[in-house]
Image (tube, helix red, strand yellow):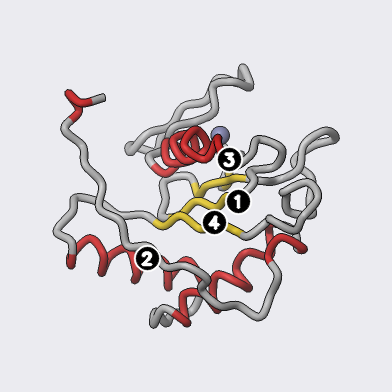
Amino acid sequence: MPNAHISFVYDIHYRVPTSYEPINRPHTDDDLWMREAMTSLGYSGTSALAQIRGYVNELRQALETNWAFTIFVVDSLNDLDGCFTDNIDSTRKWAAYATHGGPYLVMTYDIGNNGIGNMDYATAHETCHLFYATDEYNGITQKSGYLGFMILKALVA
Ligand SMILES: [Zn+2]
């Protein structure tokens, strides 16, 4: 939307090391590999969330942006379904998710069976969750936004 006058600045780090293989774990284990990844990038803290907040805060200041967030793309090239090992429900497994209100989102390279060609869609969808947008495809009425009247879930798929 060109009339929105929004631009993006990127700080990309490829192949950030971790001793874990994130795609072979449940998405709920993300604190393990995120902590190592953020430590590798030079950010310390008592949790992955604290480390990520330190990173995005520094980014925002250094790049003079209004906001910053982190996108973790988990290598799934050698994984059969391109998903983490745990299920969302009886038919879906985790392949992309975001912290409600930020500061990070996660997706696998393949985004499940959606494929890398849909990374733009997944990024847009999950980025909206970083700004408190809720899912509308599930038919559930939810209230959200910066006023935070009601946060129904800590993580949204
Ligand atoms: Zn969603």
In the picture provided, is 17 more to the left or to the right than 88?
A: left
Q: Are marks 1 and 4 in contact (CB under 8 Å)?
A: yes
Q: Nearer the viewer, mark 2 or mark 4?
A: 4
Residue indicated by mark 4? 73
Residue indicated by mark 2? 53
Task: Quarter of the image for the N terminus: give it.
Answer: top left
Q: Amino acid at mark 3?
A: Val
Q: Is mark 3 within 8 Å of ligand 1?
A: yes
As drawn, which residue projects farthest toward the top? 139
Q: Amino acid at mark 2?
A: Arg
Q: How many other residues sit within 10 Å of disc 3, few (<14), some (14-19) or many (≥20)? A: some
Q: Is mark 1 within 8 Å of ligand 1?
A: no
Q: What number is the disc on residue 109?
A: 1
In the picture provided, is 62 more to the left or to the right than 119?
A: left
Estimate the spatial distance between the alpha carbons at disc 2 and disc 4, rounded to whole Å.
17 Å
SS of the residue at dot 1? loop
Against 80, residue 144 (above or below) is above
Which label's residue is closer to the chain start, 2 or 4? 2
